Amino acid sequence: MGVGPMKFSYLAATNSPTILQQSAARIEFMDWTQYWFMFPVAMCVATCAMLSGIGGAAIFIPIFVIIFPLLGPEYPLATSAAIGSALMTEVFGFSSGFIGYYRKRLIDFKSAIPFICVSVPVAIIGALLFSVLQKQEVLLKGAYAVLMLVLCPVILRHTPPKDMLSDSADNDAINAKAEVREITGRDGQTYKFRKPRQGATGKFFTSIGSFLTGFLGVGVGEVILPQLIKRNRVPVAVAAATSVFTVIVTIASASFTQISALIDAGGLSAVPWNLVCYTIPAVIIGGQIGPLLQGRIAQRKLEKAIAILFGIIGLTMGWIVLRTLV
């Protein structure tokens, strides 16, 4: 008798419900079965991401921005919400992969720290710029189209060094004076390699990838892993595990900033909770399936397929931008 009438009389008196109340009402009336089909889709995306080392957000964002409008007007999703949701989903997917690598004892935390010191603050800067430009739909789509078209040839040209060994990495010519590190996996296999160095060039590429991750949701994973494998000759198993740890810390920082900006601008309902309630548990499962399939699918072929997909996405997104402008 007390709570209901008091609430009604308050709203009637003020006639101006708060943003939080409006958001809660919109969340309550969300169709929680609308995006059920994203559960198997997200599981497949996360599995491919773990196998190839490519951030899942790079595939989620085109699905949200390009595919969803084709499904009908009842699937509206702003570009800013798509990027924020994809990044938040990727946090859980990479967290699942991180747990798997941590159990295998393959993460070199000391090697990850210098990359994290660069990637986290720069990613936050990119996320803050995103919060300023989140309503510029054409700009966000255009920037994403350019990013996809750049990543396509970069991934196609990437080739792992032929002299990479499974138990050690001979990088004396690259970093002869660095200390030798030793990582022993849970299976008893030992990996020896020299302490990775970023250098000025490495910091530059790490900064670019991190900024793009904060701004567009993808980029840091595509620059960290090649630095570890190609430039520093870290064994692939250790490089992949260390890269996943670096990426999860970076995207968690960027995701928190982006989601906070979305909520600040449009309340809690600005985040499509009825979408992420399917994608988050799906990528957690996919993050465990990926490591199990490691070695059964040719990684280079998968990378080429994803690179071609990126090219198609870039062209499609660019066409959408041009059509909007014209």
Image: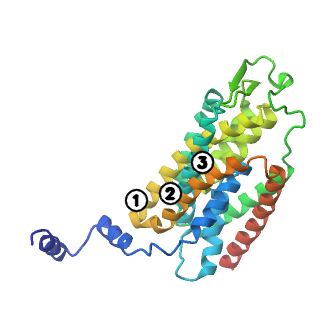
Disc 1 from disc 3: Cα separation: 26 Å
Question: Depth check: 34 or 179 in front?
Answer: 34
Mark nearer the N terminus (1 vs 3):
3
Residue 226, by quadrant, is: top right
The x and y percentages for residue 132 are 51, 58
Count residues near mark 2 (Cα–Cα under 10 Å), then give few for <14, some for 14-19, many for 20+: many
- Which disc, if any, is residue 131? 2
Q: Looking at the rendered structure, which numbered label has been put on residue 94?
A: 3
Tell me: 267 left or right of 205: left
Residue 320, percent across and down?
69, 75
Q: Which residue is mark 1?
A: 264
| Sequence-wise first label, 2 or 3 | 3
State whether residue 283 is above or below residue 100: below
What residue type is disc 1 on? Asp
For label 3, the SS is helix
Q: Residue furthest left?
A: 1
